[in-house]
Image (cartoon, rainbow, N blue to C red):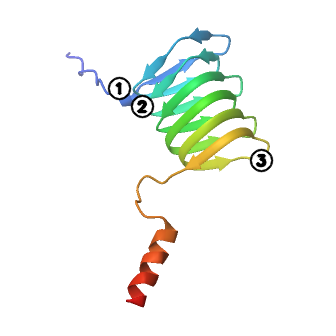
Amino acid sequence: MMNAPRRNDASAEHNRIVEGTQIQGNIHSPGDIRIDGHVKGNLSVGGKLVVGPTGAVDGEVRAQEASLAGRVLGKLEIKGLTSLLQSANVQADLNTGQLAVESGAQFTGTCVMANRKTTATPADTVAAKKEASAA
């Protein structure tokens, strides 16, 4: 009997750094990654980054989405939703599409939220309507 061909879809892959593991260096993952250990270095994640309650990241992070319950120190660029869970301790400059913060989460730093799907802000739209009606 023939084996079905194995699907090589990198975005469906999940990587995990377990508690007690320490990594120093940069990581590139085309799919999702969960960190319960400690990473000191830059992360480039093609999917969702999850930092568990025992996880820690020191460095620059780029990801599609992020769910943070552990400690993160550095710079974060998240295209979609960033969730800071109750046990999160984040000290970072955060640039994200959306932000959700649970009660008890700690955040120190700057946050810029930009919905990349729209090009006009609500204030720009109102100003344009006023100009059009005045003309």
Q: Is residue 52 visible?
A: no
Which residue does the image show at 46% across and 26% down from the upper left?
44
What whole-number distance in Å separates the C-alpha atoms at marks 2 and 1?
9 Å
Residue 91 percent coordinates (x, y): 70, 33
Which of pointers 3 and 1 lies earlier in the amino acid sequence?
1
Locate residue 116 relative to residue 88 in the image: left or right. left
Q: Which of marks 3 and 1 is in front?
A: 3
Question: Helix or strand or loop: what does disc 2 sit on?
Answer: loop
Disc 3 residue type (three-letter): Ser
Which residue does the numbered mark 3 point to in the structure image?
103
Disc 1 residue type (three-letter): Ala
Which residue does the numbered mark 2 point to in the structure image?
46
Disc 2 residue type (three-letter): Gly
The answer to whether the residue labelled 2 contacts the one labelled 1, judged by CB atoms less than 8 Å apart, is: yes
Q: Can residue 134 be seen in this view?
A: yes
Q: In which quarter of the image is residue 67?
A: top right
Locate residue 44 relative to residue 1 in the image: left or right. right
Which residue does the numbered mark 1 point to in the structure image?
10
Locate residue 112 relative to residue 12 in the image: left or right. right
Question: For the residue carrying disc 3, how many other residues have a C-alpha within 10 Å: few (<14), some (14-19), or many (20+)?
Answer: few
Rendered-image quadrant of the N terminus = top left
